[in-house]
Image (cartoon, grey):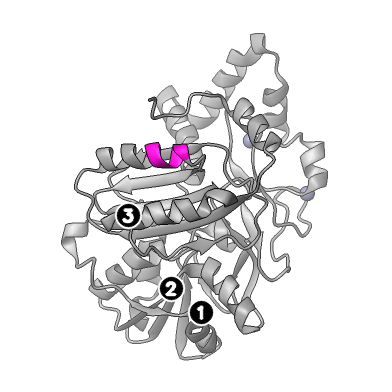
């Protein structure tokens, strides 16, 4: 059996749109020792392919991090298979808030050095000494307390469209950057109570342990992240203190939590919280674009990209060169493009 997807994107999306059954979008992660990540990955692929699951999953020696869509009729089989693994038993599963079942169109399971690209040296601090887990209700009750520092551990493009009231949201492009910026920014406030949050909780596991290692006295984290918060406050009938949209790392790009739009179109400036990737695949940058600008620029981030996007195949090399000039030498150009894509492709939540 082939353990990799073999169809192109268009074909896969066409198939997804023709499906006549429902899918449920879920996510989960666990830090747990995986002795042989490649074998583990291959066996997961066999099982999940057979259940027609889609998603993006990272497997590492340190654990598993998964965002998936599972045919709703197969969900029970999926969960009992999960329970049959010692490493994945009793997994807390997070269910998507807004779910059209179109979150993923293929199954991708990758072996990586880490399940979250944190850039930290795990040998240098105690990764198991994590911050205290707060339930959604506990977290909710402490928001607004002037003695508490609420820190958004996500990247700038995520907090831009939605965040907790009064949260510290830094201008970081990656999680690595974010961690160091938080340590710098809060250097003089290490004795204060700190409340960390991220999309589903996985980033705060590492970040909270690292902050404690760096001398922070009272580190707490939102258990299950924004996804679980949104679900629980609905059940508890509380008003959301998370304002706007929760950025998610699948085709939906965001789940509306409070209904407010707190960000603006990067092109015309009017209120908008819809992320898109520039349609010019030499660029592919992630940005916020309103429907009018999407029509005006054909889904591109500017005139330059629109022109390149519409260039006939025969002139394509000219544009590759032009974008190379823009990004510097060929190597840097490749790296620039790769980084832009990677930023968005490291859907580490
Ligand atoms: Zn616009
Ligand atoms: Zn562009």
Is residue 150 toward the left or the right of residue 3 in the image? right
Single out the residue that lies furthest toward the top: 314
- In the picture, the disc for residue 223 is 2
Q: Nearer the viewer, mark 3 or mark 1?
A: 3
The span shown in magenta is: 45-50
Q: Residue furthest left?
A: 123
Question: Magenta stretch: dominant SS?
Answer: helix
Residue 295 placement (x, y as % from top left): 81, 38
Please name whichever residue, 117 or 229, is drawn nearer the observer in this view of the structure: 229
- Residue 53, x across and y down, in percent: 50, 43
Task: Say which residue label 1 marks.
Answer: 136
Mark nearer the N terminus (2 vs 3): 3
Q: Identify the element where label 1 is drawn.
A: helix
Report the number of discs. Answer: 3
Q: Which mark is residue 84?
A: 3
Cβ(mark 1) to ligand 1 < 8 Å? no
Picture residue at 58% right of the left edge, 58% below the top = 247
Q: Is label 2 in contact with label 3 (beta carbons under 8 Å)?
A: no
* In-image side of 156 versus 185 (left or right): right
* Nearer-the-camera pick, 181 or 288: 288
Q: Position of residue 73 (x, y in %)?
A: 58, 50
Secondary structure state at the residue bearing disc 2 = loop
Residue displayed at 23% across by 69% down? 128
Task: Give the residue displayed 46% in from the left and 62% down from the top.
Answer: 93
Q: Is residue 46 magenta?
A: yes
Q: Few, some or many C-alpha atoms within 10 Å of disc 3 (few <14, some 14-19, many ≥20)? A: few
The answer to whether mark 2 is within 8 Å of ligand 1 is no
Q: Quarter containing ligand 2?
A: top right
Where is 343 relative to 232, above or below?
above
The answer to whether the residue labelled 2 contacts the one labelled 1, judged by CB atoms less than 8 Å apart, is yes
Distance from the alpha carbon under mark 2 to that under mark 3: 24 Å
């Amino acid at each position: 059996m082939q353990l990799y997807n073999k169809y192109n994107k268009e074909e896969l999306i066409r198939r997804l749109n023709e499906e006549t059954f429902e899918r449920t979008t879920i996510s989960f992660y666990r830090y747990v020792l995986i002795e042989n990540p490649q074998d583990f990955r291959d066996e997961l692929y066999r099982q999940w392919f057979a259940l027609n699951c889609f998603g993006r999953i990272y497997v590492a020696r340190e654990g598993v991090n998964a965002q998936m869509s599972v045919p709703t009729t197969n969900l029970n089989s999926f969960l009992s298979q999960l329970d049959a693994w010692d490493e994945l038993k009793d997994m807390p599963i997070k269910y998507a808030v807004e779910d059209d079942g179109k979150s993923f169109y293929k199954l991708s399971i990758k072996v990586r050095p880490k399940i979250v690209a944190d850039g930290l040296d795990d040998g240098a601090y105690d990764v198991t000494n994590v911050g205290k887990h707060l339930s959604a209700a506990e977290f909710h009750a402490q928001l607004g307390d002037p003695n508490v520092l609420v820190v958004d551990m996500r990247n700038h493009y995520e907090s831009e469209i939605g965040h907790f009231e009064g949260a510290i949201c830094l201008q970081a492009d990656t999680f690595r950057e974010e961690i160091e910026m938080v340590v710098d920014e809060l250097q003089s406030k290490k004795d204060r109570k700190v409340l960390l949050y991220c999309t589903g909780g996985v980033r705060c596991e590492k970040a909270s342990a690292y902050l404690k290692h760096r001398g922070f006295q009272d580190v707490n984290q939102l258990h299950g992240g924004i996804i679980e918060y949104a679900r629980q406050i609905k059940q508890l009938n509380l008003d959301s203190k998370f304002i706007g949209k929760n950025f998610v790392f699948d085709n939906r790009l965001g789940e509306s939590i409070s209904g407010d739009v707190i960000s603006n179109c990067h092109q015309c400036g009017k209120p908008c919280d819809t992320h898109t990737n520039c349609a010019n695949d030499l660029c592919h940058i992630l940005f916020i674009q309103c429907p009018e600008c999407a029509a005006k620029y054909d889904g591109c981030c500017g005139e330059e990209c629109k022109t390149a996007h519409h260039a006939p195949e025969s002139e394509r090399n000219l544009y590759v060169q032009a974008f190379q000039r823009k990004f510097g030498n060929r190597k840097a150009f490749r790296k620039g493009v790769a980084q832009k894509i990677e930023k968005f492709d490291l859907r580490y939540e």
